[in-house]
Every structure is written in C-alpha cells, then in structure tokens.
Amino acid sequence: MAKNPTQYLCSECGWTGVKWFGRCPECGQWGTIDEFHEARPAARARTGAAGPGTGGARGGIGTESGRVSRTQAAMVADGVATPITKIGTESVTRLTTGFSEFDRVLGGGIVPGSVVLVAGEPGIGKSTLLLETAGHVARAVAGGDSGSGDDGSAGGAPDAAQPRTVLYISGEESQAQVRMRAQRINAVEDNLLLAATTDLATVLGLIGQTRPALAIVDSAQTITSQDVDGISGGSTQVREVASALIDTAKTLDVPVLLVGHVTKDGSIAGPRTLEHLVDVVCQFEGDSETALRMLRAVKNRFGPTDEVGCFDMSGEGIEEVTDPSGLFLSSGSGDDGMATEGTCVTFTLDGHRSLPIEVQSLVTASVLPTPRRAANGVDTNRLAMLVAVLYRHARINILANDLYVSTIAGGLAKEPACDLAVAAALASAANGVPIARGTCAIGEISLTGQIRPVPRLEHRLAEAARLGFTRAVVPVMRRRGRSSHDAAHTAGLEILQVDSLRDALATLGVAAKR
C-alpha cells in the first residue's frame, strides 16, 4: 500500500508529522499547524545508484543496512569540489538601489543572484519603496555614476551606455494601478517592465525571457503554483514560490526583491523556512500616525544585521533621511535653544546608528483614586520602576501625581540607557526647574539608585558632540580599554561622570529641594 503523502507542518518551527495538533508539540504555539501535501517522487527516484557488490539496481547507497535511497547519485565531473585556498576572492559588484539608506542596510547594495525579502505591515509602504527603487535602477545607466554592478544579462559586461531593465511583477494590483502609483512617485521609465500575474510559471518565464538587472515580485503570498496543492498564501504555496524564485535567481544571476506579508503579531506570514531560504530579510517598520519609516536587516548573508535605514513617507513617495537627528529633537533641545522644564535628551542605539531622543514629561496633581500613568515611546513598567527609585533614593515623591511621559516623532526610549533621561525629565517637571540647554543624560538606573554603564558609550558621545551638545552626564567609566579612554575625551564635550541617581540629578540641577 502506498504511503499517504499528506503531512502536517508547523509554520513557526518547521515541525512535520502525520497527525494534526491544535498546539505544536515542538514549539508549543497554537494554531500554527497546517496540512502539507508532499509531492510524490518519480518512479526512478525510488531506486538507489547501484554500487559494487549490490547485485542489482535496488542495492543503492545504504543497502547493507536494508535502506534504499530515493535519490540516485549523480556522476560528478572532476574539479567540482575545489580547495578553498584556490578559490578567488575577487569582490562581487553590487547593484545600487538609488537609496543610500537602503544600500547600507543591505551591506552596500544588492548582490547579483540574491533574494531579498522585504516584510512589513499592510500600508506601511513596502510596494512604494520597491517601486521607487525600481525607478531608480531603471533610470540609472549601467557603468555610470548612478549605479554600479552587473545588469543580469548574459554574454559579458554591459555596455557603458546600456540602460538597465527592471521587471516589476505584481500579484495584487493591475498594470494600470501600478502605473498610477509609479506616476505619482515619479518612477515611470521606458525600461521598467510591468506585469500583473499570480501564476508562478508565468513569473519564472518572464524573468527568464527578459533577464532583467532587477526583478521585483509583489508579493510571495499572492503567487501560486499549479504543480502543488494548497491555497494562495499557504505554507505549501509559499515554500514552492520561494524555492522556485531562489533557483531562478541563482541560475540566471538575477537579484530578486520579494515582498512578504506579516501576521497580526508582526511575524512574517507563511512557513518559518521562508526566512531561512532567502539571503536577506528586511523588516519595514513604522507608526501609521507618523511619517517616519525604519528599514532594518533581520538576516543578511552579505553584510551586518544591525544596520537600520530611515525614510520619510509622504504623498509623493518615500524619501531617505540620511541624518534623522532633527526628527527626534524639538527646537529647544540644542545649545542654541531655550531650556524647557520637563525635558531631557538622551542617545539610544539602533544598530550601528546613534539617535538622539528627547524625553518630555508632565507631572500634575491627581484627582483620581489611582493616579494616571500615560507613556508614549517609553515602557510603562520601566516608568513605574523609575518613579519608585526616584522616591526611595532621590527623595522626589511623585507617587500620587498623574504622570505623562512621551518622546518626539515616534522615537523609542525603551533602552535601559534612557533611564537617566526619563528620571531627569520627571524630576525637572516635578520641581519646575529646566535642565540646562546643550545637556544630555545617558545611563541605566538600578533598583539601588546606581547609574550603571551602557554599551558603546563612545558612539553616543561622538554623536552628541556632532549635534552641538556641550555637556553629558554619564556613568563612571571604568578602565576597560581604548574605548573608555576615547569616550572620556570626546572633543567639544564636557563629560560629567556620576555614580548615583542623587548625584546625577544634582549635576543636572534638578535635585530635590531640601
């Protein structure tokens, strides 16, 4: 009797079994197991390669233990396996996207033959970003200053005046709808080819026929294959689409940008193996109430995974923000502004980039039995802890007050290094004393009221000096190497080292009045 090819697959951890479970027995997640139909192997694939002394075709590899291999061993030519010391180390020429922020997140540009997955929430701007990228690549001339890299065509290096062909395949919109959006963001080019299809075979045929410098598929959850079972967006279909696109990209040396949807909890829709198959996984994040968009690399085989790119979403498209410092600061935060009570500036790390974050607070008398705690951009549990530490170790009692703490432009001050700035902003608002302009505070606060060191302090202080800050209140820097020495001697910045919360508030001028 033939074995039933129907199996069940967990989209979170990749567990497979012959029985359905409401909860995955491997990772413990609920509702992640879907039916998966395994393709039947060909008849000749059930026979292993004949080996010496096997006595027939059913010998194959592993016949001595009674096992039969389903895949035959191929005749491999000499020279396929090469010693690693003899492999050339010439660098691969990357394709620029037209966005310096996008290129930095990718590690310097798009590697030929790579598959990049860009995921994000609905309406965040994934399609707009990739369509505008397609316009930039199509507008650039191969070999010119606007972009460098292979154009994906066969037959040698491209001509210096040859325009690049970009293929944009949409499974969600019609060609007319994509053209309207391209016209709005100024991405209409003659060598930008548009196609609207949901058939995987047609997609692969278009890529093989046009041999573009860049192929964009929007999205992985809308493309289906007629050769496998399953609905559009299911685990089986997404796995087949990703595998076929990766094989085509590697074979034709054509880079592919693949759009991916996310679930309600923010994870990428489809099987977890989708993230393992592709070369680069980028998350496009942002708040729908603000125009700021952040692109971060979650996985990158060709570069670092701690880079982040900043973009500004507008009605005319997406613009990159090469210096996002001004987005998170108000007009009175620098050295030339007016000091305002209840505000303090800190510097947080997002990947390799140090970003200034202005924390604003408001302390008012409460008329409610339970005082109100409202936080935007700050962890509410962290805020409750800092209020208790202020009362116990700094003699600032705001336990019975309504507290409102927020950041500017959707910035996040949830890193422990932002504790000192949040506590200083609360103390400033409670005492009605502003913190001197041009001053920033960086440090983690422990439950004992100590100011603990933070990682990569030298990068934070260097960014503070570049933005014109003159004073920085930081933890005491222990002698741990050259980085501590560099941080303590940042040019143009007065470093004030403190060991406790009470000393830090006294240095900032917002300590409790005796």
Image (tube, rainbow, N blue to C red):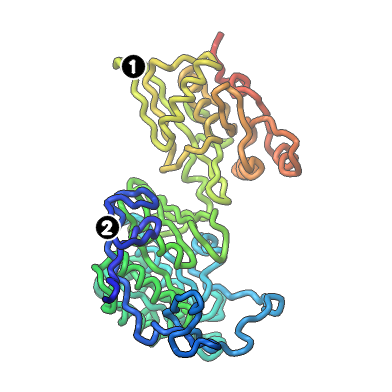
Image coords of residue 441 (percent x, y):
58, 32
Quarter of the figure with residue 512: top right
Which disc is residue 20 wearing?
2
What amino acid is at disc 1?
Ser
Identify whether 279 is placed above or below 92. Answer: above
Q: Residue at x 49, y 36 (%)?
A: 358
Q: Residue at x 46, y 18 (%)?
A: 430
Q: Which residue is label 1 attached to?
A: 366
Screen quadrant of the C terminus: top right
What amino acid is at disc 2?
Trp
Identify whether 374 is placed above or below 411. Answer: above
Secondary structure state at the residue bearing disc 1: loop
Q: Residue furthest top?
A: 514
Pick whichever, 332 or 54, lies toward us: 54
Quarter of the figure with residue 212: bottom left
Q: Earlier in the sequence, mark 2 or mark 1?
A: 2
Residue 222 at least partly seen: no
Image coords of residue 300 (percent x, y):
52, 62
Image coords of residue 271 (percent x, y):
36, 61
Residue 115 at least partly seen: yes
Image coords of residue 54 (percent x, y):
50, 86
Q: Residue at x 58, y 35 (%)?
A: 335
Circle 2 crowding by C-alpha within 10 Å: few under 14, some 14–19, many from 20 = some
